[in-house]
């Protein structure tokens, strides 16, 4: 592992981190049918879709965890003990949780990991303060929202323990 490869890795992490902070996008729409059969449609313009936000955070988590192996290889190439990287991860709860989440993404099932918890992730959601909204148009059973300031929108991915306690947000851990 060369210094140039490590530099490229951290540049990639920077781009992926920036992608999680980028909120603007084409938006999305969804429908909900009430028990009485009436269907309601919501359309949001001006922010990225929840699926895109989820892709961004999951990619970042995977690359954060992959960085551990890159750094271990670089330590070994420089005659250092790769265990120093493992020790640094084990000493940082946020990195332990990122590792557990990355392993969850890669393997699909929760398991006790470095954080010693069976973590799972909830559903990505967004919180939009009123000052971010440019306009709301109501048409019968459709509501269309135009986001004027996507930078004010917050995407959130709950991190949940095996007993159902929410312990944080994957975007914050990453």
Image (cartoon, grey):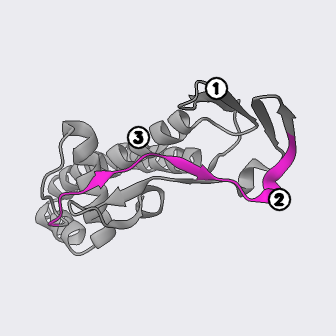
Q: CA distance from mark 3 to mark 2?
A: 30 Å
| Quadrant of the drawing holding the N terminus | top left
**Image position, residue 67 (x, y; %):** 30, 50
Residue drawn at x 18%, y 58% as measured from the top left: 118
Q: State the residue position of label 2.
A: 131
Asked whether, in this view, residue 86 is left or right of residue 136, the answer is left
Element marked by disc 3? helix
As measured in the structure, the alpha-carbon distance from the residue carrying label 2 to the one carrying label 1 is 30 Å
Q: Which residue: 76% across, 37% down?
A: 46
Residue drawn 54% across and 44% down? Answer: 15
Please say whether residue 67 is visible from this viewpoint.
yes
Measure how far apart labels 3 and 1 are at the Cα level: 38 Å
Q: What segment carries the magenta color?
A: 116-136
Q: Which residue is label 1 attached to?
A: 38
Q: Nearer the viewer, residue 116 or 7?
A: 116
Q: Secondary structure at mark 1?
A: loop
Residue reaching furthest front?
36
């Amino acid at each position: 592992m060369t210094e140039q490869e490590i530099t490229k890795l951290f540049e990639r992490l920077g781009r992926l981190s920036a992608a999680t902070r980028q909120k603007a996008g084409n938006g999305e729409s969804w429908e909900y049918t009430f028990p009485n059969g009436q269907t309601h449609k919501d359309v949001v313009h001006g922010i990225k879709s929840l699926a895109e936000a989820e892709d961004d955070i999951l990619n970042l988590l995977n690359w954060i965890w992959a960085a551990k192996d890159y750094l271990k290889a670089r330590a070994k190439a420089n005659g250092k003990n790769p265990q120093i990287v493992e020790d640094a991860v084990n000493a940082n709860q946020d990195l332990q949780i990122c590792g557990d989440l990355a392993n969850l993404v890669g393997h699909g099932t929760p398991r006790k990991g470095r954080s010693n918890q069976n973590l799972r992730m909830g559903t990505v959601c967004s919180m939009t303060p009123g000052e971010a909204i440019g306009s709301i148009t109501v048409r019968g059973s459709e509501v269309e929202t135009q986001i004027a300031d996507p930078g004010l929108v917050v995407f959130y991915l709950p991190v949940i323990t095996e007993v159902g306690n929410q312990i944080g947000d994957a975007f914050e851990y990453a």
